[in-house]
């Protein structure tokens, strides 16, 4: 989330999206920015304990987070799955994604 925030502050998100040619996959840059905003809302709606241990996110907690972020509970579940997939990818390429917790 910190890296995404830095890119947004620099105004490079749209340029970055262009570089990876999302238009070929028929994904609109504005849609991507909206998704990033949803992810940020979900992240901000989680408490520190939930960020440190995503295993804690049962249905009750997912519903609370979804209400706080203004999204559907399935978007919270998808966010967690995406985080886990990114972590596994980082581990497989030797990155620092080996930790279980969300970055603060």
Image (cartoon, rainbow, N blue to C red):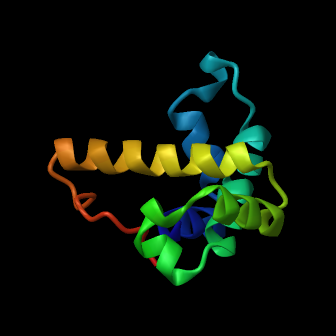
Image quadrant of residue 64?
bottom right
Residue 36 on image: x %, y %: 67, 53
Q: Residue at x 79, y 48 (%)?
A: 72
Residue for point 49% across, 44% down? 82
Q: Residue furthest bottom?
A: 48
**In the displayed image of the protein, which residue is found farthest to the left?**
94
Which of 16 and 66 lies nearest the eye of the viewer? 66
Q: Residue at x 85, y 60 (%)?
A: 70
Residue 41, position in %: x, y? 72, 65
Residue 100 position in % (x across, y down): 31, 63
Of residues 42 and 2, the one drawn nearer to the viewer in this rendering: 42
Q: Residue 23 is drawn in which quadrant? A: top right
Left or right of residue 28, residue 59 in this image: left
Task: Judge from the rendering whether residue 88 lies leftward or rightward of residue 13; answer left or right.
Answer: left
Q: Residue 10 falls in which quadrant of the image?
A: bottom right
The residue positioned 60% from the left and 28% from the top of the image is 22
For residue 39, above or below residue 78: below
- Circle count: 0
Up/down of 87 relative to 28, above or below: below
Could you tell me residue 89's position as x and y percent?
29, 42
Report the side of 24 relative to 93 (left or right): right
On screen, residue 94 versus residue 70, left or right, reads: left
**Front residue of this view, candidates 30 and 87:** 87
């Amino acid at each position: 989330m910190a890296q995404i925030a830095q890119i947004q502050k620099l105004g490079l998100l749209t340029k970055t999206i262009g570089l990876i040619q999302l238009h070929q996959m028929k994904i609109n840059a504005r849609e991507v920015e909206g998704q990033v905003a949803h992810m940020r809302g979900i992240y901000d709606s989680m408490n520190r304990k939930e960020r440190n241990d995503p295993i804690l996110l049962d249905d009750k907690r997912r519903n609370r987070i979804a209400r706080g972020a203004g999204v559907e509970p399935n978007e919270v579940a998808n966010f967690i799955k995406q985080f886990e997939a990114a972590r596994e990818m980082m581990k497989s390429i030797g990155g620092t994604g080996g930790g279980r917790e969300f970055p603060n």
